[in-house]
Image: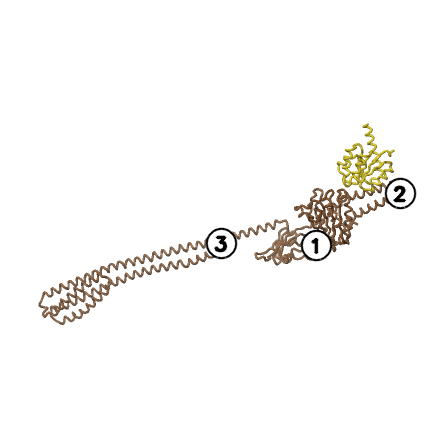
Amino acid sequence: MTGLYTVLCVDDEALGLQIRRALLEVAGYKVLTALDGKAALSLFEDNEVHIVLLDYLMPGMDGGRVAAVMRALKPHVPILLHSACVDLPQETIDLVNATLSKGEGPEMLISRLQLLIDASHVSMGRNQ
Amino acid sequence: MNLGDFRHILRQAFYVPLFALIALAGIWLWQVTSTRQAQLWLDHSDLVSAQIAELERRIIDQQTALRGYELTGDREMLHTFDSRNSNIESQFTYLRQLISDNPQQIGYLVRAHDAYLIWLGFAQNVITSPNPTADKSLAYRGRDLMTVVRQAIRTLSEAEDKLRKERLERAITLERQEIVLIIIGALVVGVALSVFSMTRLRRVSKAYQRTLDDLQKSNTEVYESREWLRTTLRSIGDAVIVCDADSSVEFMNAVAEELTGWKMAEANGKPLQQVFHIIHEQTREQAENPVEKVRRLNTVIGLANHTALIARDGTEYVIDDSAAPIRDKNGNMIGIVLVFRDVTDQKRKEAVLIANEKLAVAGRLAASIAHEIHNPLDSVANLHYLIARESDPVKRDEYLNMAQQELTRTMQISRTMLNLYREPNVPITVDLKELLEGVLLLLQRRMDNQSVKVQQDFQGSYVVEGFPAELRQVFANLITNAVDAVGNDGRILIRMRGLPAEEFRGAGVSVEIIDSGPGIADQASQKLFQPFFTTKGDQGTGLGLWVSMGIVQKHGGNIRIENNNDGDLHGASVRVYLPVRTLATPASRTTAHVD
């Protein structure tokens, strides 16, 4: 069922990203990974992505800027901001669909992801 | 009026009356001489008149003798005639001498003499005639001739009488003149001298009055300036004690009275050390007498740090003080002014500020640390989830291995974090290289976000004594400043060098943090180490450098900040010098002990 959905996972921590990919694949998602904003945007443009799991603190281009570009490219794709950062700027929080602190645990991550995907489908179905 | 003028007036007061009196005496002398001269001429006239009378008498006697002879024919009668004859000639000569000054009188005398000679010729004829008694005509003739003689003598006599009258008048005039001159002269000179003396005395008295006024005025000024000074000192918020060169207290203001517990009246004249009893706050040793210290250094001094004042009632105040010498015109020290204030509260507040700054450093690092710890924790949680669902042992080992890596990282970060607080009781050996790497690890995330590149230029060994947590705080602060200054894509060079011992400095280590930022503005460079000075607006506490300087100085080192001109980084260069042998003591540890 869930194998249908593609998650774009963006984080500058290589090991953390590798583990998250394994986790999400076990949970039944197709996973794309990017280590920085630029790579993420190119993957986002070239592939069908159902949800973006985005880190905030990244060298070069932070999560806020990446989210803004993604919104401009494909506004309907939900973005879950997933960060250990305690003082996220309000404009970024307003831009993304939801935020999730790192360390909340894998179950919480998976359920939040699925919730957002379902919600986007409902709204898309309503649009069609 | 100066002394010269005064002496001039004294000379005038002596010489002017002297010369005036001499002149007056001269005039009087001349007048007296003139009067006397007139008297002499009068006497002369009297003498001349008497001699004329004598001459006339003798001539009449002679004539009488001749008449007797004519009447009697007695030759005996002629005896007096002859003797008289010669005397008459001498009388004429004498008279002529007497009136030699007056040609008119000489003329009269000559005429009388001529008439007399004619009569005498007639008389000789009578004497030689054989019978003079018979001829009556002879008698008549003789009488006529004698009349001429007597007429001439009378003329002479009258002229002399007239002359005498004139001379008498002149003498009287001169005498009157003399009296008038004496009176007027005495009056004029007297009045003139009085006026002169009065003007001189008035000048002297005016000058004296002026001097008195000046003295009064300067007395008033001295009093006013003294009062002014006293009021100023009294109303100053700091305590002020003034004492003389022998350390005797001369003045204290109210604040000083309150702090020392001595009243001004009691303390007056007491030795300074009794009233102002100061010790070293920590060693409890007697502090050097400020008077001696000022005398020794001969300049304005700030007393040693950690000076405590023990008040009369035993209360102890931490004070901040300075002492300045009071010098006389020749530059000799005649006393000192001590200014001090109670900084007990201030020290307490500073301690609170230092603690606050520690928290602020930790706070600034907290976000970074939370991120650092949450990332691996997140991974460990994920791995736990995966391992629980994984049946392939190879994969499970791989996950466990990954979990181990993430846990190691977490522990390393948490240890570094804890090291910021955990502090030994005594200074220990600190490897600065290790310490700096730990600090950089904590700041790594922050620097990565800004793409700040750090170049480490370390040579040699860098072991110093000190309190590692405090030094970590210093370097975290300095490197954070550099990261703030360089902005995105900046560069930071950390250069560490061992320094050999020099004359005024022991062997140590220099850590230089050079950045590619904009450098330090001139007006900011003076205030960098003052508390609450910040260039970061609301983002900074303004305490970082102040606390860092305090920590480094306590270790016996120092911090210098300047703009870097060396190499390709043109921002600020912060150089920290730390001695190998620290001056810090267990008592000077500012960090609370955390076990």
Name the subunit of mark 1: B
Front-most of residues B38 and B187: B38
Q: What separation in Å lies between label 3 and label 2 (alpha carbons)? A: 113 Å
Image vertical order of residue B179 relative to residue B135, above or below: above
Q: Identity of the amino acid at label 3?
A: Thr
Front-most of residues B207 and A33: A33
Q: 10 Å neighbourhood of mark 3: few (<14), some, or many (≥20)?
A: few
Seen in the image, is A3 located left or right of residue B197? right
Image vertical order of residue B528 relative to residue B197, above or below: above
Q: Chain A is which colour?
A: yellow
Q: Are marks 1 and 3 on the same chain?
A: yes
Q: What separation in Å lies between label 1 and label 3 (alpha carbons)? A: 57 Å
Label pair 2/1, CB-CB below 8 angstroms: no
Q: 10 Å neighbourhood of mark 1: few (<14), some, or many (≥20)?
A: some
Q: Under tag 3, what secondary structure?
A: helix
Image vertical order of residue B38 relative to residue A46, above or below: below
- Looking at the image, is mark 3 or mark 2 earlier in the sequence? 3
Q: Under tag 2, what secondary structure?
A: helix
Residue B406, position as x, y percentages in the image: 83, 44
Q: Under tag 1, what secondary structure?
A: loop
Q: Chain B is which colour?
A: brown
Seen in the image, is B200 located left or right of residue A109? left
Q: Which residue is mark 2?
A: B396
The tally of labels here is 3
**Residue beneath the point at 86% across and 33% down:** A4
Label pair 1/3, CB-CB below 8 angstroms: no
Q: Which residue is mark 3?
A: B211
Q: Identity of the amino acid at label 2?
A: Arg
Residue B171, position as x, y percentages in the image: 27, 59
Q: Which residue is mark 1?
A: B281
- Looking at the image, is mark 1 or mark 3 earlier in the sequence? 3
Q: 10 Å neighbourhood of mark 2: few (<14), some, or many (≥20)?
A: some
